[in-house]
């Protein structure tokens, strides 16, 4: 049986599967993007200042540009400087210039006295007894000298980094783009939403769920099809998705006679990474690679497909985006007892509630479904509790790892 | 001075400002959306099952549809049932039907025996000595009975809820849509990215930053303009943004003679909600309301604009989306000392690192800028530490509140 040759000899544990995903998912080739679209992406070039920032001695407050020698004195006004204005009139010991926040300080300015800290009477101003040198002035280059490295390749682009990019004249930046994806649902029992299902048919719920989840992860889902359990039909769909970075198939990934996905992946020329994970739900999960492209064979059970997408596909997306700050671990306190599975990690749907006080932990309330495929009861969950394999029950109050599901 | 009439008599504290934002930001009118676009939005109608789920006795495993009386016996094969197939042949005490996961169990089926738990020899199968009634069968309606409420109005739409919607035949759902926004940057010293700045000019960094942040929050930024510090120009821009749910202005919101935004908001007919918050950065923040529309006057300082957008605009967006699970609070441990401000809450940019073990706290490392407007050093921060007003220094190891910035 060709199918068996495709399988790796042993099932992997969830941690091993995560490690294999990280190794298989190569960061995408960087490209130039408008800075407005770059927030959250990985920077792929060093960001340097093209000139001193600020480029001139900038007033940081609305107030008065003065000399230190004027401290405590009542001095006369010479004029007013708005932001953007060039003023060549020098400040004198006996006279000031009114200045707006963001404006360029006139020649001779030693400090800016905040409006609220001086007494103004007509054009005359009485200054406080002490005026500190350089007060409320940002000197040229004090925030960033020309040529300085602001952010390096590999850093994640923040909102403030977009501001810094704009400040140094970048309109586009080289960054690692998000991967593109295709969603292929397989299953002879599935009907699409347009058609009323027959007696033994059900509606395709994985297709819309996976498309919605990818969209919420900002991934461009370029293709979405539903195909019957036929080798050629599945292969044709996979070949059509050839230019997508990620191909997500659902269904047909187990060991039944209609489970054609492992076979099709081999026919397509993809190299297996792993097949089967010691977990519940989602044991049949399959990962294969075709050059830079990753193909996930997700189980047909929607609860299992959901877990596998949240845990493994999301990780693949983050790796393809060049992220190195890989998912952090969180812990919380069970509000009810839980029975682990003997040989498998159990990902239990849960309502996860944040703590009210610094010393509290997250509260994790398991959400039990009527069956292992029941999305109707479990859909109010906003996360999963990670229950390690074992024989001892967990009691209410025990601390376990958890993760929240998209969107946060 | 008309400007003063617009001002509320007292500055508000950050908590009060948040309360006022929540009261002013009304949830948007719900509309019908494709379910693929609804993840993360607030459901605005009850979601009910249109039929029993599963609609037929569904096999949950690849295996054999059998009678309980066949336990421990070797029985003959009658045929094979694929998912989606209708089989009218009844199972007998001396004969089984091979069945695929997801298929409809044939008449008389009392249990499905997992492939791995029986010995198969040609067409004959030897069953285990004990077969439990109903094992590996999801009975009709067992996951969800026809008419049952799956999710109520006001609940946040999860990925699994999208799967449930698809399963019960919803292609569209009534939900509260995301708000639309306009970004207006003001300032005579600002030049847009296309033009080389003059000696006293700087490039507009708030415009691209705010646009990028809104995009990362999935908000449709319909309009983005940069206008000089002139009453008519600002008013014209605000009027142009009349159909946007949110208008974000930056700059011109303080008390200098060029700070025209409060005046313009009054001319526009907006009602003030608050002006000035006891915080650093972002003290001049202004919020006004024009019927359902909210107008934020953000400070021109990009660091202050960033903080105000992360803290108050984001909250307004969440309220407009009808969210009731308002931002949770998080606490972490300082890695370095911090000096609070006497009368103001200090939002300190920080690198926030997750704990490695259940008993650990988040590690909060303050990121100090060279000035209060320095985005070049602070742009590596991924959050803010909330330092309450006070006179006593905080030491390394102290626990303080923090929040992470978009994107997580």
Image (cartoon, coloured by chain):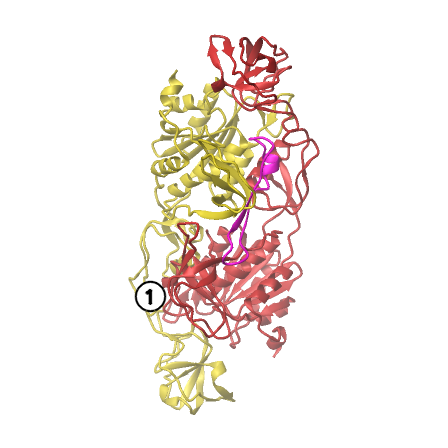
Chain colours: A red, B yellow
User: Quarter-wise, where is residue A237 in the image?
Assistant: bottom right
Instruction: From this view, report whether residue B31 is shown above or below residue A384.
Output: above
Residue at image coords 54%, 34%: B303
Instruction: From this view, report whether residue B328 is shown above or below residue B111.
Output: above
Please state if A400 lies on the left or on the right of B26 as rendered.
right
Residue nearest the observer in this picture, A179 or A391: A391
Residue nearest the observer in this picture, A360 or B375: A360
Magenta span of residues: B352-381
Residue A61 drawn at (x, y percent): 53, 23
Q: Is residue B340 magenta?
A: no
User: Quarter-wise, where is residue A53 in the image?
Assistant: top right
Give the chain letter at badge 1: B
Residue B82 drawn at (x, y percent): 45, 76
Residue A91 drawn at (x, y percent): 61, 12
Residue nearest the observer in this picture, A78 or A39: A78
User: Quarter-wise, where is residue B317 in the image?
Assistant: top left
Q: Mostly what secondary structure, the magenta segment?
A: loop
Residue named by callout 1 = B144
Q: Is residue B358 magenta?
A: yes
Res. A239 visible in picture? no
Q: Residues within 10 Å of mark 1 (few under 14, many from 20)?
A: many
The quadrant of the rendering that contains the N terminus of chain B is top left
């Amino acid at each position: 049986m060709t199918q068996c040759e495709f399988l790796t000899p042993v099932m992997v544990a969830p941690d091993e599967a995560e490690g294999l995903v990280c190794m298989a998912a190569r960061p995408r080739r960087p490209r130039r993007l408008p800075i407005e679209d770059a927030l959250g992406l990985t920077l792929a070039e060093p960001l340097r200042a093209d000139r001193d920032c600020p480029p001139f001695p900038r007033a940081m407050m609305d107030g008065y540009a003065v000399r230190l020698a004027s401290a405590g004195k009542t001095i006369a006004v010479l004029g007013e400087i708005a932001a953007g204005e060039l003023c060549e009139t020098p400040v004198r010991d006996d006279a000031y210039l009114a200045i707006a926040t963001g404006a360029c300080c006139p020649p001779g300015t030693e400090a800016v006295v905040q409006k609220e800290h001086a007494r103004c009477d007509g054009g005359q101003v009485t200054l406080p007894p002490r005026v500190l040198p350089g007060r409320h002035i940002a000197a040229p280059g004090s925030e960033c000298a020309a040529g300085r490295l602001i952010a390096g390749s590999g850093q994640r682009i923040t909102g403030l980094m977009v501001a810094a990019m704009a400040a140094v004249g970048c309109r586009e930046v080289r960054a690692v783009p998000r991967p593109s994806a295709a969603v292929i649902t397989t299953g002879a029992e599935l009907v699409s939403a347009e058609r009323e299902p027959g007696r033994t048919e059900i509606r395709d719920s994985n297709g819309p769920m996976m498309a919605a989840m990818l969209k919420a992860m900002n991934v461009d889902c370029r293709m979405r099809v539903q195909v019957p359990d036929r080798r050629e039909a599945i292969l044709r769909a996979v070949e059509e998705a050839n230019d997508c970075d990620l191909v997500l198939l659902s269904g047909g990934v187990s060991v039944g006679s209609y489970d054609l996905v492992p076979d099709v992946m081999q026919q397509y020329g993809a190299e297996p990474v792993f097949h089967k994970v010691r977990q519940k739900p989602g044991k049949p999960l399959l990962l294969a690679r075709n050059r830079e492209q990753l193909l996930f064979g997700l189980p047909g059970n929607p609860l299992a497909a959901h877990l596998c997408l949240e845990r493994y596909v999301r990780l693949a997306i983050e790796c393809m985006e060049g992220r190195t700050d890989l998912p952090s671990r969180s812990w919380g306190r069970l509000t009810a007892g839980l029975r682990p599975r003997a040989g498998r990690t159990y990902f239990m749907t849960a309502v996860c509630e944040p703590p009210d006080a610094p010393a509290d932990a997250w509260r994790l309330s398991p959400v039990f479904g009527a069956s292992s495929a029941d999305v109707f009861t479990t859909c109010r969950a906003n996360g999963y509790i990670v229950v390690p394999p074992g024989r001892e029950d967990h009691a209410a109050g025990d601390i376990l790892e958890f993760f929240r599901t998209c969107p946060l």
